[in-house]
Image (cartoon, rainbow, N blue to C red):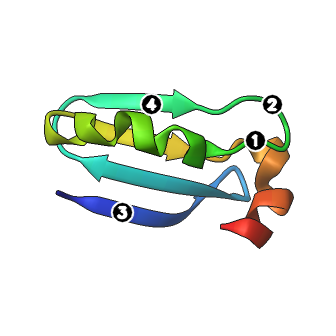
Amino acid sequence: MDVYTGYRKVKGLDIFVKKLGSGKAIVFLHGGPGDEHRYFLPHVTPLANDFTLIFYVRACCINQNKKRL
């Protein structure tokens, strides 16, 4: 399974991105400030066998999540 985890520069901000799998993309958007992508993983990781799963931390949550990720 292809895996990418890291930060991408978007409009001057470092955005945390995690990509799993290959194939057509499914983008997961976490809930509001204070939330992040990890609660999706146990439920959707099997989809990475057929799709590219893309998770990212919203810009409003970057500082908070950089400390935890």
Q: Position of residue 43 (x, y in %)?
A: 41, 34
Q: Which amino acid type is shown beneath numbered disc 1?
A: Asp
Q: Is residue 63 above or below residue 41?
A: below
Q: Amino acid at mark 3?
A: Tyr
- Marked residue nearer the N-terminal end (4 or 2): 4
Q: Amino acid at mark 4?
A: Val
Residue neighbourhood size for the residue with mark 4, other residues' Cα within 10 Å, grouped as few (<14), some (14–19), many (≥20):
few
**22 left or right of 7 in image:** left
Q: Which residue is mark 2?
A: 32
- Amino acid, disc 2: Gly
Say whether disc 3 or disc 2 marks the residue closer to the N-terminus. 3
Across and down, in percent, residue 17 comes to 52, 54
Determine contact: label 3, label 2, CB under 8 Å. Answer: no
Element class at badge 4: strand
Name the quadrant of the C terminus.
bottom right
Q: Which residue is mark 3?
A: 4
Mark 4 in CB contact with mark 2 (< 8 angstroms): no
According to the picture, the residue beneath numbered tag 1 turns out to be: 35
68 or 66, which is in the foreground? 68
Residue drawn at x 30%, y 31% as measured from the top left: 25
Q: Position of residue 11 (x, y in %)?
A: 70, 50
**Circle 2 crowding by C-alpha within 10 Å: few under 14, some 14–19, many from 20:** few
11 horizontally vs 44: left or right: right
Dots 2, 1 in contact, CB < 8 A: yes
Residue name at image x 73 percent, y 57 percent = 13
